[in-house]
Image: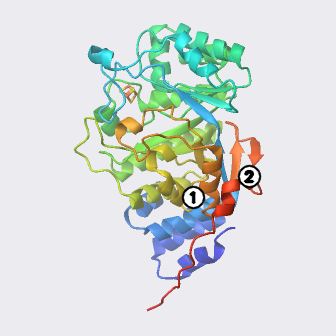
C-alpha cells in the first residue's frame, strides 16, 4: 500500500524547503537530481528517506518481495589482482591456500544439483590466466548440454575485460561469443565505485568504471539483461556514491538493460582495509533508501542477505528493497570470508518465505528475469502454525 499520507505529512510538516521539494518530486514521479541525493545523504533523517523509498517501492511493487532458487560456483579464489577491500582472494604466490577448479570439478558441482529445483547458477571468482575465453565458453556449453533450463548468470566485466584482452578480442566479439556459448545474464559485480579517485585506490589494475559500463552497454545491445552493484562504506564519500549511481542511471536511460541494483556493504575482516570501521545499520538502510529514490529507472533494489544478515534484510524491505536474492545453499564464500553476519549462508525456501511474511510482505519466487515461479502469498507451511505473531506492545505518548 502506498504511503501517501505519510508523504503528505512530510511535505506539510517540519521538513525544510529542500526536503519538501524532493518529497513533491517523489510524489509526482519526477526524477531527483544529484544535489537532491547529496541532501538526502547529508541532511535527511532515516525516517524521511524511509518514507520516500517505501513510497517508490510500493508504487512499483506493492508488498511483493522476490527471491529465487540459485546456487553459486566459484572456479577459483586465487586472483592476480589485489583489490584492497577483498577478503576472498589469495595471491598467486600463495595459491596453495586457495582452490582452482577444473571444468570437470565445476560440472560435478552442477550435477550435484540435478535433483534440486534451482533455476539459476551464479558464477564468479578470481582472475587467473587458465580461466580464459575457451574455459568459460566450454563451461557454459557443458552446463547447457547437461541442463538446458538452468539460467547461467556469470562473470563480471572484471573477468571479461581480462579474458578478451588476452584473446585479442573486442568487447563486442567477446560478449557475442559468450552469448553463443549459453551465457544468459550478467551479475552486477566488479562495479565497486566507478570514480577513479576511489577506484584507483581500492581496485587498481582491473577494468575501469568506463570499461565496466561499456561491457554492460554491449551486453544490453545484444538484447540481454544484467545487474549493477555499488560497494560502499569504505574510503568513498557520498559524492562518489551519487556519481556512481548517476552513471548507472544514464546508461539505463540508453539501454534499459539493467534489472536490479544491489548495494554491497564493505566488510572489514581479513583485507587491507581492516582498519576502517564498517557502516552501521542506519547507514545501510539509508543507502538502500536513497538508491531506491534516485534510481527511478531501475525496477528492483536487492538486499543480499548473506552480507547484511537476516534481520537487517527484513528491515530493508521497508527502505526500498523488494528482492532478497536467493536461497543460497552455502555455496558462496565471498562474504563469509569478509566477516559477514552469515557464516553459513543457507536458507531453505520455507525459511526465506517466513522471513518475508513476518514483516508483512508478499513472497514471490521468481526466475532470474523476474518471471513468477511460485506465489507464496497463501501457501502455509507446517511451521507457520507455531508462529503466533509478535506481541502487541502498548504505545505510550509522553
Ligand atoms: S575483488 Fe575480485 S578482482 Fe579484486 S582481488 Fe578480489 S577476486 Fe580479484
Check the image and report above or below for 333 versus 9: above
Task: State the residue at coordinates (36%, 38%).
Answer: 338
The foreground one among 47 and 112 is: 112
Give the numbered dot on residue 376. Answer: 2
Check the image and report above or below for 163 versus 158: above
Q: How is the image coloured?
A: rainbow
The foreground one among 105 and 63 is: 105
Give the numbered dot on residue 363. Answer: none
Check the image and report above or below for 366 versus 315: above
The image position of residue 209, as x and y in percent, is 43, 32
What crowding class fits label 1: few (fewer than 14 Cα within 10 Å), some (14-19), or many (20 or more)? many
Query: Is 191 positioned to the left or the right of 317 in the image?
Result: left
Rendered-image quarter of ligand 1: top left
The foreground one among 127 and 53 is: 127
Which of discs 1 and 2 lies nearer the camera? The answer is 2
- Residues at marks 1 and 2, CA–CA distance in whole angstroms: 17 Å
Q: Is any part of residue 64 visible from this angle?
A: no
Task: State the residue at coordinates (46%, 12%).
Answer: 165
The image position of residue 87, as x and y in percent, is 33, 33
Task: State the residue at coordinates (67%, 32%).
Answer: 118
Proximity of marks 1 and 2: CB atoms separated by less than 8 Å: no
Q: Is any part of residue 175 visible from this angle?
A: yes
**Tag 2's secondary structure?**
loop
The image position of residue 237, as x and y in percent, is 33, 50
Kindly give the residue lying farthest to the left in the view shown.
275
The image position of residue 238, as x and y in percent, is 37, 52
Instruction: Pick whichever of labels 1 and 2 is earlier in the sequence.
Output: 1
Query: Is 37 positioned to the left or the right of 144 in the image?
Result: left
User: So how many labels did they put on this image?
Assistant: 2
What crowding class fits label 2: few (fewer than 14 Cα within 10 Å), some (14-19), or many (20 or more)? some
To which residue does mark 1 refer? 317
User: Quarter-wise, where is residue 234 in the image?
Assistant: top left
Amino acid at each position: 500500500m502506498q504511503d501517501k499520507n505519510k508523504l503528505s505529512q512530510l511535505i506539510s510538516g517540519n521538513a525544510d524547503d529542500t526536503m519538501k521539494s524532493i518529497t513533491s518530486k517523489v510524489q509526482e514521479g519526477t526524477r531527483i537530481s544529484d544535489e537532491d541525493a547529496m541532501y538526502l545523504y547529508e541532511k535527511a533523517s532515516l525516517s524521511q528517506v524511509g518514507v520516500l523509498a517505501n513510497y517508490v517501492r510500493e508504487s512499483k511493487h506493492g508488498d511483493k518481495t522476490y527471491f529465487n532458487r540459485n546456487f553459486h560456483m566459484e572456479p577459483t579464489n586465487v586472483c592476480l589482482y589485489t583489490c584492497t577491500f577483498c577478503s576472498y582472494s589469495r595471491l598467486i604466490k600463495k595459491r596453495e591456500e586457495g582452490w582452482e577448479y577444473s571444468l570437470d570439478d565445476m560440472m560435478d558441482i552442477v550435477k550435484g544439483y540435478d535433483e534440486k529445483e534451482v533455476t539459476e547458477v551464479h558464477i564468479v571468482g578470481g582472475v587467473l590466466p587458465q580461466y580464459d575465453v575457451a574455459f568459460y565458453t566450454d563451461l557454459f556449453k557443458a552446463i547447457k548440454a547437461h541442463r538446458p533450463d538452468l539460467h547461467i548468470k556469470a562473470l563480471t566485466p572484471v573477468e571479461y575485460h581480462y579474458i578478451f584482452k588476452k584473446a585479442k578480442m573486442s568487447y563486442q566479439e567477446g560478449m557475442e561469443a559468450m552469448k553463443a556459448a549459453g551465457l544468459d545474464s550478467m551479475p552486477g559485480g566488479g562495479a565497486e565505485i566507478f570514480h577513479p579517485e576511489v577506484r584507483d585506490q581500492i581496485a587498481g589494475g582491473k577494468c575501469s568504471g568506463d570499461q565496466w559500463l561499456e561491457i554492460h552497454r554491449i551486453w544490453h545491445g545484444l538484447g540481454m539483461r544484467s545487474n549493477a552493484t555499488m560497494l560502499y562504506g569504505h574510503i568513498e564519500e557520498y559524492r562518489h556514491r551519487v556519481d556512481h549511481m548517476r552513471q548507472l542511471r544514464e546508461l539505463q536511460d540508453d539501454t534499459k538493460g539493467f534489472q536490479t541494483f544491489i548495494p554491497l556493504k564493505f566488510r572489514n575482516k581479513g583485507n587491507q582495509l581492516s582498519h576502517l570501521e564498517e557502516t552501521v545499520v542506519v547507514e545501510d538502510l539509508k543507502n538502500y533508501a536513497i538508491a531506491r529514490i534516485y534510481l527511478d529507472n531501475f525496477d528492483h533494489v536487492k538486499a543480499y542477505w548473506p552480507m547484511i544478515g537476516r534481520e537487517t534484510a527484513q528491515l530493508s524491505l521497508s527502505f526500498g528493497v523488494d528482492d532478497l536474492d536467493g536461497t543460497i545453499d552455502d555455496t558462496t564464500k565471498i562474504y563469509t570470508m569478509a566477516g559477514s553476519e552469515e557464516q553459513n549462508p543457507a536458507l531453505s525456501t520455507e525459511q526465506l518465505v517466513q522471513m518475508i511474511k513476518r514483516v508483512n510482505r508478499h513472497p514471490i519466487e521468481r526466475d532470474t528475469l523476474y518471471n513468477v515461479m511460485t506465489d507464496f502469498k497463501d501457501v502455509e507451511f507446517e511451521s507457520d502454525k507455531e508462529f503466533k505473531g509478535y506481541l502487541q506492545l502498548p504505545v505510550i505518548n509522553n
